[in-house]
Image: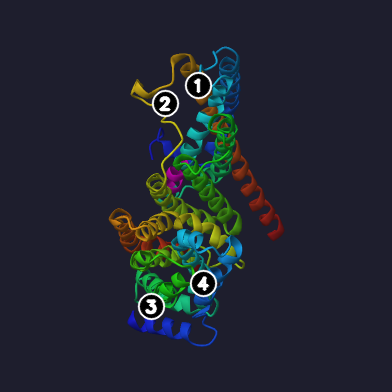
Amino acid sequence: MIALLIRDLRLAMRAGGGFGLGLAFFLIVVTLVPFGVGPQSELLARIASGILWLGALLACLLSLDRIFALDWEDGSLDLLATAPLPMEAVVSVKALAHWLTTGLPLVLSTPLFGLLLSLPQAGYGPLVLSLMLGTPALSVIGTFGAALTVGLKRGGLLLSLLVLPLYVPTLIFGAEMARRGAEGLTYSTPLLMLAGITCGTIALLPFASAAVLKVNLR
Amino acid sequence: MSANSIWEYANPKKFIQTTDRVLPWISVLAVVSLVVGLIWGFFFTPDDYRQGSTVKIIYLHVPSALMAINAWLMMLVASLVWIVRRHHVSALAARAAAPVGAMMTVIALATGAIWGQPMWGTWWAWDPRLTSFLILFLFYLGYIALWEAIENDDTAADLTSILCLVGSVFALLSRYAVNFWNQGLHQGASLSLDKEENVADVFYYPLLVCIAGFVLLFIALVFLRTQTEIRARRMRALLARERMG
């Protein structure tokens, strides 16, 4: 498992692996928003946490088809399927690798992007905390979507259509937590709900993803 | 397998025979109850003292909303049957129900918007019920798109049924998340089993007839579409055999 994780991380880091593309995309979204809604800092401060959540979600979405596509093309996915490692573990490791290369950099860079969008002082802690809690769920759910569409030639658009509705609860609680934090309210309820969703998806969804992947490899 | 088991209808031939026999009856009953319910509702019930005649859209809105949810539940059950017992008819029935359910969602949203414009002063509000219906519609779209995208029938059936299971959990989660996210404009349930919350009796009985009509319409459409699917698949098999031979 650890070998697989290290392999995936190494592949992502190297040239063409797409590491950092998500971050660049995130930066572009954050840059474009003021062009769209105007540069007034009161307005930006009000929507900053929501924009940052949306940006993180979209950046996550864009990198999803990479999770299985390359391994599917060169056949290493078949090798993994016949390996003694259970499919559920493979899927979980893939999701973890995706989070480490996409979700974690996003989380770590949000304070900087928050600065660009004049996020209120009180908002930084809750925003980073909510993304820290929420992005693993995005990766795990995304892995399920990627497993569903792995065999398809042009699955990218379909993948978004399948995954985005599944992202709704995570986004709602995450953005709500960040918003409440930015406005100086208590945010323990959305925090607990978000943590619950993340734990639930990490615990249960790999089974569904593994089942789907087995069907696709048949 | 016992002769009277429900699984008998998993045999496509038996399914087509039986549905052929009941389909005319169900269709006629659906049309009759829809005509009776709608005419009764539209012309023989009084206007509401606050809402005027716009209240009458309830006869389309409530049944279609009800069926939009029930269609998804039916797909969920059919998907489970497919996963557990692998009866093809079940997978095809789930596939057949999806567009009907999506259409019901659209009807519910559209009639709601038409009613909401004079009543709430807006076509659309980010009310929990409206929002969760929109999300339900997205789930339908994803489900249908996945069916269309995959060429191998069995693979498609497997993948969509798992998507349906996972989607059900997330749809339910979204429903409650949305509730938490925004307070609603939408009134409480129009119908419930304990009579406290119901609409007044004058509206209640035609509404029940309309709901029966929508249920029958849904059943008739699903039967018909499932039959079409079975026949189309049989035709493809025959064509393939001809090409081989």
Task: Count residues near mark 2 (Cα–Cα under 10 Å), then give few for <14, some for 14-19, many for 20+.
Answer: some
Distance from Cα at disc 1 to Cα at disc 2:
9 Å
Instruction: Identify the secondary structure beneath mark 1.
Output: helix
Marker disc for residue B191: 2
Relative to B71, does residue A119 appear above or below in the rendering?
A: below
Q: Is residue B53 left or right of residue B202?
A: right
Marker disc for residue A26: 4
Instruction: Identify the secondary structure beneath mark 3.
Output: loop
Q: What residue sits right under mark 1 in the picture?
A: B207
Give the residue at x 43% y 58%: A171
Question: Where does residue B45 sit, x and y in percent of width and height?
Answer: 54, 13
Confirm whether circles 1 and 2 share one chain: yes
Distance from Cα at disc 3 to Cα at disc 1:
59 Å
Relative to A12, does residue A28 appear above or below in the rendering?
A: above
Residue B134 or residue B83, whichever sits in front? B134
Give the chain of mark 3: A
Residue type indicated by callout 2? Leu
Residue contact between numbered discs 1 and 2, judged by CB atoms under 8 Å: yes
Give the chain of mark 1: B
Q: Is residue B90 left or right of residue B122?
A: left
